[in-house]
Amino acid sequence: MAAADLDMANKIRHEGFHQSQVMHTLEHLTDNIGPRLTASPQMVKANHWTLKQLQDWGLKNGQLHPFEFGRGWSSESASITLAGPRQQSLHGIPVAWTPGTNGVVNGEVMMFDVNTVADLAQYAGKLKGKILLMGEDLKIEPPKTVIFERLSAKTLGDLKDYEPGARASYQSFMTNALRDSRMQSYKFNKALSAFLEKEQVAGVIYRSSRQGGLVRVFGKSHKQGETFPVPAIIIEQEDYSLLTRMLDRKEQPKLDLDIKARFHDDDMKSYNTIAEIPGTDKNAEVVMVGGHLDSWHASDGAVDNGAGVAVAMEAVRILSKLNVKPKRTIRIALWSGEEQGLYGSRAYVDEFFATRPEPKDPAEKALPRYLWSSPGWPIQPKAAYDKLSVYFNMDNGSGRFRGIYTEGNIAAKPMLSDWFGPYGDLSTGTISPLSTGGTDHESFDDVGLPGFQFIQDPLDYSTRLHHTHIDSIDHVIEDDLKQASVIMAGFLFEAAMADKKLPRKPMPTAPSEVQQQRLDLETEKERRTRELEGKKALETKVVY
Amino acid sequence: MAAADLDMANKIRHEGFHQSQVMHTLEHLTDNIGPRLTASPQMVKANHWTLKQLQDWGLKNGQLHPFEFGRGWSSESASITLAGPRQQSLHGIPVAWTPGTNGVVNGEVMMFDVNTVADLAQYAGKLKGKILLMGEDLKIEPPKTVIFERLSAKTLGDLKDYEPGARASYQSFMTNALRDSRMQSYKFNKALSAFLEKEQVAGVIYRSSRQGGLVRVFGKSHKQGETFPVPAIIIEQEDYSLLTRMLDRKEQPKLDLDIKARFHDDDMKSYNTIAEIPGTDKNAEVVMVGGHLDSWHASDGAVDNGAGVAVAMEAVRILSKLNVKPKRTIRIALWSGEEQGLYGSRAYVDEFFATRPEPKDPAEKALPRYLWSSPGWPIQPKAAYDKLSVYFNMDNGSGRFRGIYTEGNIAAKPMLSDWFGPYGDLSTGTISPLSTGGTDHESFDDVGLPGFQFIQDPLDYSTRLHHTHIDSIDHVIEDDLKQASVIMAGFLFEAAMADKKLPRKPMPTAPSEVQQQRLDLETEKERRTRELEGKKALETKVVY
């Protein structure tokens, strides 16, 4: 077996390295459009711009694929100032999907370290007009010494090897313990919201999960009827620690909060951008590429995941420019709602490839999907299920491609190895049996469809850019994006031209009775230990 | 020769490690008082608090030593918001000694990349109400991989060795080239101020000199009559780059600036805090310890230089607590005005130890001292000149003491080595022939008095804390401060008890006629090359 078309590989390289538009695409997404929080006006703008851009490049069957999501939200500005015992500007960013302050709110700071519903009662009648620190402070440790890294030959070598302890697939089963734990959090969050509203709390403050002046953000519920009731802001660890030490010393700190934020309820849907290079003699079969277009709101979402979008777009731009006539249809999908739990790609897979039965109990069905007692068995394939060859995703920062994770689908190795062939000077083309989790290829893998991510150089993605306020285009390396675009284009072309579709793993099935019994008996601690062990095995392989 | 009192070394260790107050002292300075910009109300507060604290610990002859400085300044809050073409909060801190905005100012952003007086004219009539980016943008490079470091045995070994290329002393001569270069800057800054005021510029923006979300600050002139005329703010590199890219793409960015800042002109002096443990049979002779108490305004000045102050204070606290009766007087000096050019320590040395003749030409005398054609020769010692044994300074972050720089006074090595003896388990006690510059020991060294700094572990001082908005107590390591305090106390005690004062380098003298001729002929480029070579020789020795 070998690559189908070596001439084409040279053409792809020429277009990708010497006529590249990948940085221009990324710059438009990040600088011009900016943060692309799911269902925000800027995300809608990104949907329309990417669709038009793909169409301008000659792609066909362009559409915005809608799915139910919830409220839109955006923030224009936010400031937080220490107003006493001394004056100092602090640095914070609002929690997504929380209300603004409607002008400046001044309040005394109070520690609110509560983790269970039972703990709430002790605070009744004490919180009116207060600004709460949500959880105790942790000591800031000296920073990891390495914040920017490329994978070493040693690590790449290790990634190739099968290790019995390492989890080859991210597929996880619902257990009683997991469901209990999630249900507790769900109930606690509901009770917390009601309590904070009833007690007329002025605002709440969360501690950034990165130190060194980085504000790392997250969001509250985007579902109608579940909106967090009070203004909420995430501040630098250093500022949070200052406030907690002031409280410890009984110097009552006071804050001025001024958050401009608003909800957008004109459309409860969000959208995936879809377009195609139609196939020829096997045009009903599909090869897909994509990444999530949505981002968090802290910065411009450059490495998470403007980079993945720009590379996917550049790959199809290269192929379209080269006027390829692939056997199979090449389809690009730019997902929304990834950051809130792979909403866009799950909705797409569910609608077009395979669905799962919903709970019969109406009470259970009314709960969020992640609280259902089972993911739903058996998986029910749709007509297009057999037509998909592969989905390639990019969402691990902007580092160059060093190889690919097979998600346990190791039989795909010979084909994937061949496709790296013409790019051997650009990448070692390491084929790993291991899995990576947490992004949209999982929506495919979960129903037994081949969904892959490339092995990427970690750079400073996990150490300082992921979801923080400095995820800007400044930290993207142009040569890495060009390399990734060229390899992505090559893989799409080869997958579209190959004699056969990629092999698949066996269709996932419900756990056996014995397995389910064992899972049901597992305590939350045992479940966490099991999951951590799987994670640890992976971490010995991957440096970030 | 050997340490005078090994019993005392054990007592110092016990007090310093098991009864330490160093973190408590530092916490008060940083959290409670906060930023201590020279001549600001918080700096005055710090002067009074340190004086009282030293007196409460039993030190005598406490006083605030005044010197002429200039205006005080403080800022209560600052916000900068991208108001168009899209909305986003940016992160900035005002330039010290610049005016506030007196409410929200909205203006269009404009690039203003001007370096000479002649370049100003082209902007006449074009700047009214604009907010200027002060200088072109630079590409942000991937971060250095190591941001937190301790000195290796290898580096410590290298630091011990004399190298012919390395400059053994920081003493620098005034050259025509240097004076021309400084005079040009001085004149340009005057012309710039007048121009910005005349053109009714709304505000100016500087780019932080550290990337990764860090805001690294500085100040404009604190002298009366030289105040910078328009609001000025330093913003994150990432934000600055965004604005410049928007300008490049002709998407006119607009900003809202809201800076609260004010001047304090009730007292044009600033103050050094001074106190003593009086000596006994050699009480006219003095051993000094200190560090600068002032800080920049971006954060709480924890490692620059709360750490140095806390260690100096802890060292004398330990000795006072142990009720030592030193032969020589031990004096602590906590300087002000260091960050603007060693003002406090220079004024003190000038007043008590040695002075230099001022220029005879009244026009030259009216200029700032750094523009005088000569530092002033010959040095004129005062009565106390012969009475000072040594001044120990701490101002290289909060890392533990690994040894000491002799500033070329290598004959001091046997005594210094002996003093490290009882602390051999805590420090290798590396004695380096090399110099370190840029802080208050220079004021002593410049007039031929022994002024030393210890070799400290660099930690993350230079990579991310120095003058940035995250210089908070969170990044100080308690064990390092205890170690430094114990060794500092040991050195003070030994220096106060030694049979002899420390040896001195020869009194600095004016350059010879031949030397001055050569210096006068040197071009600015040659001067910079010479200085860089000296610096480079040092940098091969010191890792940061």
Image (cartoon, coloured by chain):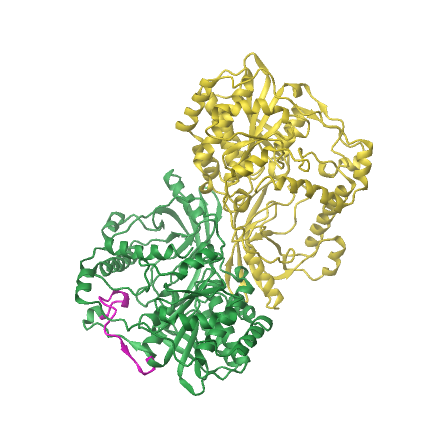
Chain colours: A yellow, B green
Depth check: give the residue in front, B256 or A211.
A211
What percent of the width, then of the height, locates residue B468? 45, 57
Confirm whether residue B100 shows in the render.
no
Query: Residue shown at 46%/24% (left/top)?
Result: A318
- Picture quarter containing residue A177? top right
Q: Is residue B137 magenta?
A: no
Vertical position of residue B3 compared to residue A543: above or below: below
Vertical position of residue A353 compared to residue B408: above or below: above
- Over which residues does the magenta segment extend? B365-385
Say left or right for A358 vs A204.
right
> In the rendered image, which quarter contains the N terminus of chain A?
top right
What percent of the width, then of the height, locates residue B144? 45, 48
Depth check: give the residue in front, A193 or B30.
B30
Say left or right for B501 vs A151.
left
Depth check: give the residue in front, B39 or B295.
B295
What percent of the width, then of the height, locates residue A109? 61, 61
Query: Residue shown at 43%/34% (left/top)?
Result: A479
- Picture quarter containing residue B499? bottom left
- Picture quarter containing residue B92? bottom left
Say left or right for B70 vs B152.
left
